[in-house]
Image: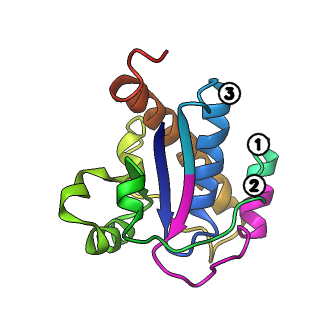
Amino acid sequence: MVNVLFVCLGNICRSPSAEGMFRALVEREGLDDHISTDSAGTGAYHTGNPPDGRAQAAARNRGVEIGDLRARQARREDFGEFQYVIAMDRSNRDDLLAICPADHEDRVHLFMDFASGTGQAEVPDPYYGGDGGFETVLDMLEDASRGLLAHIRATDLTGDR
């Protein structure tokens, strides 16, 4: 099983949206027996809360349900459990590396590194903007999800499918 953790600041917008988009893609491709997902925040601001209502609505408009997810904070133990710890921006990545054991730093990635050449290095936080920001973020997450899945297929699932 390949375990993937998506991480943003509060775990109520970007990372649960990324988890939902990637989880839906994995299910559509019939790989849910091979890949599991989770999401977390670098901060504990929203622990136990569902994703932001705007994030849920935007995802639902694309046929993706994320209302079942609950925010939690990333922890040191995650780096042993997850082969991929996917940060939404450089600040999240830096916060993750600050708690990451040295022998697992290669598991930490920026999500947009898996995108198909959008020119964007980071997924912007839509929390303080309008509804359109959530749509833009979902476009980015869909693109990066396809790239991440292709990468996992090529490096971790060879021989499985």
Name the kind of residue labelled 1 in the image.
Arg
Which is more toward the observer, 88 or 71? 71
Check disc 1: other Cα within 10 Å, few if <14, some if 14-19, many if 20+. Answer: few
- Percent from the top left, x then y, of residue 91? 35, 72
Q: Can you tell which of label 1 and label 3 is closer to the viewer?
A: 3
Q: Which residue lies at the image location 38% right of the left edge and 19% below the top edge?
A: 158
| Residue 15 position (above or below residue 50) | above
**Within the image, what quadrant is residue 147 found in?**
top left
In magenta, the rendered stretch is 38-58
**Numbered badge on residue 62:** 1
| C-alpha distance separating marks 1 and 3 | 13 Å
Q: Are marks 2 and 1 in contact (CB under 8 Å)?
A: yes
Question: Element type at marker 2?
Answer: helix
Q: Which residue is drawn at 60% across and 31% down?
A: 33
- In the rendered structure, which disc, 2 or 3, sits on the residue that comes first in sequence? 3
Residue under numbered circle 3: 28
Q: Image check: 83 left or right of 5?
A: left
- Give the structural element (helix, strand or loop) at label 1: loop
Name the residue type under label 2.
Ala
Alpha carbon separation for disc pair 2 and 3? 19 Å
Residue that carries the numbered disc 2 in the rendered image = 58
Q: Where is residue 8 in the image (x, y as percent from the top left)?
A: 49, 67
Q: What element carries label 3?
A: helix
| Residue 17, position as x, y percentages in the image | 63, 55
